[in-house]
Amino acid sequence: MWFTLDNLATAHDTHEGAAHSSTGLSNVKLGMWLFLGTECLLFGGLISTYMLYRGRVGTGPRPSQVFDIPFTSVSSFVLLMSSLTMVLAVSSAHKRDDKSTNLWLVITALLGATFVGGQVYEFTAFYNEGMGFSTSLFSSSFYVLTGFHGVHVTVGLIMLLALRGMLKNNKVPGSRAETVEMIGLYWHFVDIVWIIIFTLIDLIPA
Amino acid sequence: MFTPGSKYLIAITGLSAFSLALYMLLVHPSALGAVALIGLVAATSLLTGITLFTRDGHAAEDQTSAATLDTPTPSMWPLVGAAGFSLVLVGTVTTPIVFIFGIVAILATLVEWTVQAWSERSSADVSYNASIRQRILNPIEYPVLAAIGVAVIIFSFSRVMLAISKDAGAIIFIVAASAISLVGLLISVRPQLKKSIVQTIAVLAAVGLVGAGIASMGFGLREDLVVAAEEDHYAHQECGEEKSEHFDKGVSETVSATSGADATIELVDGKLTAQVQGIEGLQDSITVRRANPSNIIFRNKDAGEFRLSAHLGKKQIADGVMEDVVTCTQLISEGAEQWLTLTINKPAVSGEPYTLSVPGVEGQSIVVVVP
Amino acid sequence: MLTRVIGRLKPLILGTAGTVFLASCATNAPQDTFQPKGPNAQKIDSLQKPVFAVAGIIGLIVASAVVYSIIKFRDKGQPIPKQSHGNPALEITLTIIPALILAVVGVFTFRTVFDLNKTSDTQMIINVTGQQWWWEYDYPTNNEYGITQPIITSGQLVIPVGTKVLLRETSRDVIHSYWIPALNGKRDAVPGRITLNRIEADEPGIYAGQCTEFCGLSHANMRMEAVALSKEDFAKWVANELKPYVAPAKDSLAKEGETVFLNQCTRCHQVNGLTREDGTPVIAAPDENVWSGAAPNLSHLMSRNTFAGAMFDLLTPECRSDVWKSESATFGEKYLAGVSEPCLNQTDLRGWLRNAPEKKPMYANPALLADTGGKYRGMPNLGLSESDIEKLVAYLLTLK
Amino acid sequence: MANIENFATPSSAMGALKRPVVTKGWREWVFTVDHKKLGIMYMATAMFFFLVGGLEAVLIRLQLALPDGKILNADLYNQMFTMHATTMVFLFVMPMTAGFANYFIPLQIGARDVAFPRINAFSFWALLFGGLFINLSWFLGGAADGGWFMYAPNSGPIFSPSHGVDFWALGLQITGIASLAGAINLIVTILNMRAPGMKLMRMPIFTWMSLVVQFLLAFAVPVITVALFLLSFQRNYGATFFDVASGADPLLWQHLFWIFGHPEVYILILPSFGIISEVLPVFSRKPLFGYPFVVFSGAAIGFVGWGVWAHHMFASGLGPVSVAVFSISTMAIAVPTGVKIVNWTLTLWGGKLWFTTAMKFAIGLIVLFTIGGLSGVTHSVAPSDTQQTDTYYIVAHFHYVLFGGAVLGLFSGFYYWWPKMFGKMLNEKLGSWNFWFMVIGLNMTFGPMHILGLQGQPRRMYQWTENRAGEGFFNLAFWNLVASIGSLILVIGVFFFLVNVFITARSGKVSPLDPWGARSLEWMTSNPPKEHNFDSIPTVRHLDEFFHRKYAEDANGQMQQIATAEEVLKQLEDNADAHIHMPSPSYWPIVLAFGLPITALGVIYSVPLAIFGGVIILFSAFGWALEPSTAPDTDFDPPSSGDTSKDVVHVG
């Protein structure tokens, strides 16, 4: 969770500015890309754990017994849609269209919240079907993997809404467009990770 | 002209009256609870009255002082603080969660007021004071407000989803998401849309969502989930020849990282064979160490669906009542494999060895030796 | 001048260094990794010796070059040298040479790795189970060696010489590692997995080993010994292990000891053939209070030389060194004699029965046992009276 | 804000709530974002933990000096060796190299600060709090006792019921956050903030090696983060990741740990390679031999370092194919390492050697690291490794690599850069004592361990027994005693360093501007450097820019001095930039860092505390995000006249 909050901080922590940069990328953008690189390794580790353990169910339910693929497909689609609206927000920010930026940030956040709401629903349903956090290796690794992703989305949501408030009250130090763009980068990353997780968990049978 | 203090007391009176009404109507009222709440209403009305007649009068005179030269912007904190106070009281007679919410609301109010009081005394410049206040409070207000917003949506939405049927859930989900996107699109292509209309839509949507959430919470979980929770049917193994309704639903077909397994049991051409790690050739018995989790892989190489069952003797479940100890894999189709972890604490009673067999395949079994 | 002297003295210095190095080692260290006593360890040895030699020579070359530079190029007031940035041809040469050396080593390593992992010609299988902090060995039936029923033992692994033995290792709790340096390298015993380790001894004798994967509190006290017997002696050992249980004579001290044993010890320890008064066989079941719930099978305790994870000797020091130091021809006979009363190491055995956790740390903080569901690891303090201990020792002595 | 004069100044009660724009005394250090102050604090913290880790080491050696040692019991011994390794790796060498990197990278590439100064401050505080947090466990029921590798399932709640492992896992999580943030920061700094003309292949070699290290950190730390999360979830929330009865595979932990753990080894050693690659040329009066080879071999080590992790698991039963492949890849990594040794030796060759203490330590590194490297090659041979792994031979190997390599390199760096950091010269005579005691002590301590290991003494045993020590005068008992005596000599060596620092601080010789005839950019500024490092950013035309500004070839091809260091500096100062904006100090980094151990304590003891810690984190993160990097006028008291830039101070 700290990573992403720190990112928001990163986004404003430039003092040399893009003018001096040796690579042509601004410090913030380069830093963000590196951070996302490290996040790949984090999710890589979690995904490996899940792939190793998904067949080890003990006496608990198996993946294919509880998963609701139509629903998860729908909610993945919703998350993908939010990437689209995030693109609109970033492009409005570059055009200095504050009104649209605010609008699309809120829409992105609402779609994201719908997705997380869906995840909370699924988790509750799984729990009722007998799949608790410590039921089996499969359930533990499933909840940790999707839970980490969910936390990333939630942190993204808080950043989106807070950013919206900050933009409105003119509280963003540094470049507004770049700040929106950085949060956008993070948001797209989280979406892409979900596509990978969704493919591995639901589409490739265990 | 009310001061924040009198606003607070007015609000607290109103809310305690409201919670008294709520308590009497909704919760199974007890005499103690009712007395407490009535006492609260009485006390706060008294205090409100006193404040209104005394303190507000002084406040008017104080208006010359620098610190209150400009009235602070309209504040929601008196209301929050009062709500918190009532929640605490309601919480003491109902559930602890309500109590905790109340405490959090009161703490939040205290912090806000303290910082405001500090900042208002810091200099003669109101905008500077405001900036000091913002420096301290914005960092907590932004994320907390955002988080509360997100939490309300997530909570209400997930409750609705839990209450309605599975198919309707997916449809509701996609409809909600489309509605959000469409409203966004609509507003963006018609920027001249009146602000009040947008606000109305937003408020209606929010109230609708929260209302639906609360209603669904009252309704509870949908039926199949309730049944599933009661019966725990996926965990209940059925090791017979027939396909069972729940346990054999949704079969896993592959196992990852098989290299360390103790033995692999294969069903080939109606024959059951064991390949034991490190031992050349096929075996008809395997050795499993006592009190030690041992991992076994079952691979079905025959046409048709089969399961591997391990018969591990009997155990006493009550005085004189013995029950067979059996564990098994699911019914798996040709080419599939599954993982079975056995932990056997005692050697078999002589004459009744532990065995692995495939229900429906006669005369084939692997003896499990426990030394 | 100095450099020329050093150049001439080089063989002498190298020779002396080598001698000093060899002389500076212990003789007869029981776990020496350079004294193979079986073909597997021998294969490793013939691979590692040249590698050590090559590494040593390269080390000397580097050290000499550095020392030479220090002496030759120290600041004697010479002008600032030319600012040369290097010599790519030389660099590439000096990169390729070590690469080639390693390539040669790599080829031999590759061959040896696959050689050591060969299991197809196994002659005998023994299941090895690690547990905090001792090893259990079970021998599945093997008609060729007269093992008609599974044998289960602990502390000392008994194998016939010249036989390719495959150890199938696993663990009941944490990761342990099985290592008899004279017979082969180490192999971890990983819970939930079976790992394979091939050993073979050339001649009769006792080969010492030690658990080498950190396994908790008494890791230092988890030892093992491999006992190699000639094939005939091994057959005798098997026959003894398969001998049925002989109950102590009525009204003897040992018989009273049996009663104590039934009351106190059979919760965890199995003695094959032991029956209760009503004639039902006693099967030790994992106790609810003991983590991973199994303890050494004591059926033929006195046929072994050690107890408590090979940490203590069952033999007095004199008797022990008599067995350890015997010639390989007489070794089998001495070992098979087992532990007789005069040779019994009473001090350690009684101390162990009196308060086991004091002799070998089992759990760090008894107060925290509650956090682990109140489970003991290893043998608890049973609070036996001295007379009970007396009886138990007498009983245990009958378990030949 | 039109009329600033009319402001009443904020009352003193408000002091704590304002931004700490102008700081004095302790505040100057606590709220600083200056990379040099942070570098020094990193080093001081690391030195403190070095002494803690050293104390633990001495206790271990005292326990093992004689058979059946009674100084520590089994439990305490296990905690001791776990914490010794943890402290030395995570709290000494890593922060020390981070300190050097922080201090010298901006100076070496001609930058005025790092890319994200507040993140830099946060990294330091997170490291400090994380380190203290781990060590807090000593006082709360015992430290971690599973070894620094913390193999599952021995790290589970059943086998390690005290809270030690919880503190360990969460503490490393915190220091991991610090490392990750630091790594991203330094990579961006190096890639983005180089002075004009400073191409990648003109960067000083220390900066190069640090760049490789930061990449290793950025990609290795997330992997251990995952492993530590799995461990914490198992210990605190009932997950079953390493519970074998549920079918878990304990090797999962080993793979995750060593995928992090092997790059970690290079994270520890490469900075020291960088340091001595700076020191050797300076005191040989000639450039580093084969600069591109050293750079690429460093990068190659960093890259191949990802493909060798399973050589820590040769005994785990991975199967012959994996073992053979990892054996070969491990041999392959010896090649670039060998290239470095060759290049250092050839740098000495034909030079004009000046044996300062820094140089002695650097040469000591070449020889001792070579020993460690070669013993490493002997157990890259997997069959041979199955005899040696988990014995004292391995302990000998990695102490030659990490003490003979990494630590000697760091000490070389102290002596070389002390005048730069503090403007005073460390005493060379005491330095000599320091060097010889350390070198003799370390050879006496770790040399005999080769013999101990090869003759079969396993590691991590709280007692060894005479039973297995062999016969003869030079038996294992003898060598155990020698090693213990050696450790005391080592302690005396370190003591000489502390005395030296103390004496230098009180009455040390003031350093000339260029005491060593140095070659790289960090010496082209005053000693110690000004807050903004350079009055004007130099334009770089050569590798070893500073040297080439001082010396040039004459007609005969001889190097002749053309300018003094003072003249070079004067030239820079004369072209000083008029206004230099430096980032302002801030409260948020330290507050944010403080939230981490609070949350971690909450995870162990109580959920409300964890929530409280989370609130601190959230609060300070957003406070940070809302705060501009450079303080606006209103933050000053009295409010600034509108120009927050600092006037350039002219020296000389």
Image (cartoon, rainbow, N blue to C red):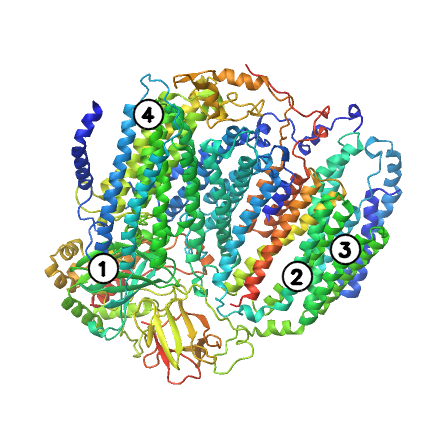
Q: List the residue tagged with mark 1.
A: C226
Q: Quadrant of residue D585?
A: top right
Return the x and y of residue C24 as percentages of the image width and height: 19, 40
Q: Nearer the viewer, mark 4 or mark 1?
A: 4
Q: Is residue D283 left or right of residue C242?
A: right
How far apart are labels 2 and 4 at the CA level?
68 Å
Are the residues flagged by discs 1 and 2 from a single subunit? no
Q: Chain of mark 2?
A: A
* Kind of element beneath mark 3: helix
| Residue located farthest toward the front when viewing the structure as drawn | D555
Q: Tag 1, which secondary structure? A: strand
Q: Amino acid at mark 4?
A: Gly
Of the numbered discs in the image, which one, if any, rests on residue D350?
4
Spatial distance from mark 4 to mark 1, Cα to Cα? 58 Å
- Contact (Cβ within 8 Å) of mark 1 with mark 3: no
Which mark's residue is nearer the viewer, 2 or 4?
A: 4
Looking at the picture, does residue C137 appear above or below residue D140? Answer: below
Residue at screen point 34% across, 24% down = D351
Residue D451: x %, y % from top left: 25, 43
| Distance CA(mark 2)–CA(mark 3) | 17 Å
Front residue of C358/B286: it is B286
Mark 2 sits on what residue? A77
Q: Mark 3 highlights which residue?
A: B184
For badge 2, the amino acid type reads Phe
In-image side of B67 versus D437 (left or right) = right
Amino acid found under the numbered disc labelled 1: Ala
Point out the image quarter for the N terminus of chain D.
top right
Q: Are marks 2 and 4 in contact (CB under 8 Å)?
A: no
Question: Within the image, what quadrant is residue D22 found in?
Answer: top right
Along the line of sight, which residue is nearer the eye, D247 or D412? D412
Kindly identify which chain the residue marked by label 3 belongs to: B
Residue B31 placement (x, y as % from top left): 76, 63
